[in-house]
Amino acid sequence: MTVDAVRVELGARAYEVRIGPGLIARAGAEIAPLLRRPKLAILTDETVAGLHLAPFQAALAEAGIASSALALPAGEATKGWEQFSRAVEWLLEEKVERRDVVVALGGGVIGDLAGFAAAVLRRGVRFVQVPTTLLAQVDSSVGGKTGINTAQGKNLVGAFHQPSLVLADIGVLETLPARDFLAGYGEVVKYGLLGDADFFEWLEGAAPRLASDPEARQRAVRRSVEMKAEIVARDETEEGDRALLNLGHTFCHALEKATGYSDRLLHGEGVAIGCALAFELSQHMGLCPQEAPSRLRAHLRAMGMKVDLRDIPGDLPDAEGLLRLMAQDKKVVDGKLRFILARGIGAAFVAEDVPGDLVRRILQEALATR
Ligand SMILES: NC(=O)c1ccc[n+]([C@@H]2O[C@H](COP(=O)([O-])OP(=O)(O)OC[C@H]3O[C@@H](n4cnc5c(N)ncnc54)[C@H](O)[C@@H]3O)[C@@H](O)[C@H]2O)c1
Ligand SMILES: O=C(O)C(=O)C[C@@H](O)[C@H](O)[C@H](O)COP(=O)(O)O
Ligand SMILES: [Zn+2]
């Protein structure tokens, strides 16, 4: 199998996303051209460190690159002020200079946190994403949204800071637990839903074998990255169309906050539930036929994914409580929520005027099934 390269066209800040097997083993040669001196600081998490750090550092050493690493606790709770501050102080202790490069080796939690640390360290250093989850390979490592969660909500502090290179080694996904693989699939299916009906149709057949068939997996990662790269190149800082990538996320982020960023609900699981709710809302607004949410639900169920609010264990706030959490969404303009809705599978758009009462009703109906 060959390595695919997708370019994110951002002028002077353009970069490549390389996708394929064996990229960790070649990491030294891949990253060396970016370095002014043969030294790298790596941020990772404890789980990924146990599995993939040694081979990664060995590959760097083979190319004459010395590296040091800080492993943070695994999981969403790490993506907050405490571990962020720890990471920044460590990078300073390591004497990372303005022209050095920081590496994020891990899933979306590490990528978002390390990217934000790189964005603010000495007012900005370059960084390389080495995503190790399906979610990070198809989504979080690309596009430059970096940041952390705060007591007020999800991803509320951060920066747009593009990586200089992304190395998505599809082989590392072999060690990913099934639950995390499926959560990542929530973001993959999002791409089909938001803009490529043919991709969604292909996924309906191919999705069950993505974990075991490297060729199908590489195709799914590549198509997702192509779509994200194209949208990000058009609208890097989400003035308009980039918001399409937020399909399902207004619901998802409120649910993640409501469940305390715990393993009651992983981000990608929330995205799948949020997409189902967004299609439900679109259907209630007469924008799309019932066939669309039904087909989406059937596919997610067939994949063994969480689809409904009843699939989230433990208590949830009532509809008013969820609406209050949704009010922190970054798509809010003049205090009014905007949603990503759809006219069908593969046909999403940004909607400005969504009746609050209808959103409340959708949430009440979804909560009533619990
Ligand atoms: N910046 C963006 O554009 C963007 C896009 C989507 C999601 N996100 C963010 O990404 C985060 C979710 O990312 P995630 O799902 O990758 O979660 P994660 O980083 O917590 O990783 C999930 C779990 O998998 C483990 N893991 C990682 N790689 C592994 C491997 N190869 N083998 C075995 N275990 C491995 C991790 O230790 C962790 O326990 C959320 O915070 C979300 O908000 C950001
Ligand atoms: O890259 C984007 O743009 C996205 O919206 C991708 C999302 O999958 C991702 O979860 C993102 O972090 C959400 O962004 P936010 O601005 O709503 O925090
Ligand atoms: Zn997401």
Image (tube, rainbow, N blue to C red):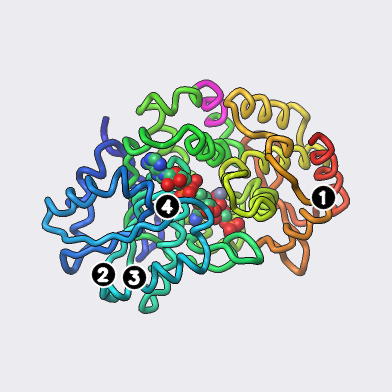
Say if mark 4 contacts mark 2, CB within 8 Å.
no
Residue 277, percent across and down?
Answer: 73, 41
SS of the residue under disc 1: loop
- Residue beneath disc 4: 141
Tell me the tag on residue 90. 3
Number of other residues with Cα within 10 Å of mark 2, as a class: few under 14, some 14 to 19, many 20 or more: some
Q: Which residues are magenta?
A: 199-205
Q: Please state, as top left, top right, bottom left or bottom right, where the C terminus lies in the image.
A: top right
Gap between marks 2 and 3, in whole Å? 14 Å
Mark yes or no: residue 122 visible. yes
297 vs 98, left or right, is: right
Gap between marks 4 and 2, in whole Å? 19 Å
Q: Please state, as top left, top right, bottom left or bottom right, where the N terminus lies in the image.
A: top left
The outermost residue toward the top is 205
Q: Amino acid at mark 3?
A: Trp
- Residue beneath disc 2: 100
Between 204 and 210, the one lying in front of the other is 210
- Residue beneath disc 1: 318
Q: Is residue 193 magenta?
A: no
Residue 230, percent across and down?
Answer: 47, 49
**Disc 2 within 8 angstroms of ligand 1 (CB):** no
